[in-house]
Image (spheres, rainbow, N blue to C red):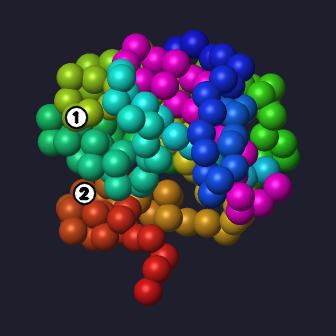
Amino acid sequence: MQIHQGQKEITLNSNTRKSIIEYEFDNYILYVFQGNISQFDILIKYKKDNLRIRTPKHIHWAVDMLIKMQCKKQLSIKFLNEVKNIWNNCAPLQNNDFNTLKNLVEHNNSLIKIDSYKELDLYGEYPVDFLFVLMLLLSTQEKTNRPDAYMFGSIINELLETDYDIFKIVSTAGFTGRK
């Protein structure tokens, strides 16, 4: 992974925004922009190769983890337990500038031996180094905007159930809060 000062520009609601930071992986780039929900909210986007830029949803990583779990269950569970530990210790952002976001990822990357999970890259869509940073950013975003947030943690807990319910996982991960 390489970390760069943000260069990507997008237009949201007729306003142009430049990314704060970019995390570059072999086939993916994660972009972080200033969000709208709170002062330190972050908006996460990603792009694979030359495809269009997308907004990640919980359902994306949850389905990817379900695929990985079907192929390498114990290794996937070990990875999810590490992500759960980071979720449990995740704190709201006190700033969302380049250095804060760079340090967030570098610090948490030092807590996990991501190379020990590389075998999971053979299954699903996302490589584990990308998936880890995406999950870290999504959980940080959730806690920044709402310290009592629970959706990310709920999905992890459901995936870690011995007899997980795929329909419950997909329902929770796909929840949008709309009525």
Disc 1 element: loop
Q: Residue at x 20, y 30 (%)?
A: 123
- Name, please, the residue furthest toward the bottom: 179
How many circles with numbers are drawn on the protein?
A: 2
Whether residue 104 is visible to the viewer of this picture, yes or no, is no
Tell me if residue 128 is in the magenta stretch.
Answer: no
- What stretch of residues is rendered in magenta? 22-39
Q: Position of residue 18 (x, y in %)?
A: 69, 34
Left of 83 or right of it: where is 109?
right
The residue nearer to you, when weighing 121 against 24, is 24
Q: Residue at x 45, y 71 (%)?
A: 176
Disc 2 element: loop
Label 2 belongs to which residue?
162
Q: Quadrant of the C terminus?
A: bottom left
Determine contact: label 1, label 2, CB under 8 Å.
no
Q: Amino acid at mark 2?
A: Thr
Q: Please name which of the two marks, 1 or 2, marks the residue nearer to the observer.
A: 1
Q: Position of residue 43 (x, y in %)?
A: 62, 47
| 18 versus 168 height, above or below | above
First in sequence: mark 1 vs mark 2: 1
Check residue 52 in the rendering and tell me which mark sits there, or answer none.
none
| 76 versus 162 height, above or below | above
Whether residue 51 is visible to the viewer of this picture, yes or no, is yes
Label 1 belongs to which residue?
124
Q: To which quarter of the image does residue 158 belong?
A: bottom left
- Name, please, the residue furthest toward the front: 14
Q: Residues within 10 Å of mark 2 (few under 14, many from 20)?
A: few
Left of 37 or right of it: where is 114?
left
The residue nearer to you, when weighing 156 against 137, is 137
Q: Position of residue 120 (x, y in %)?
A: 27, 26
Q: Residue at x 79, y 50 (%)?
A: 40
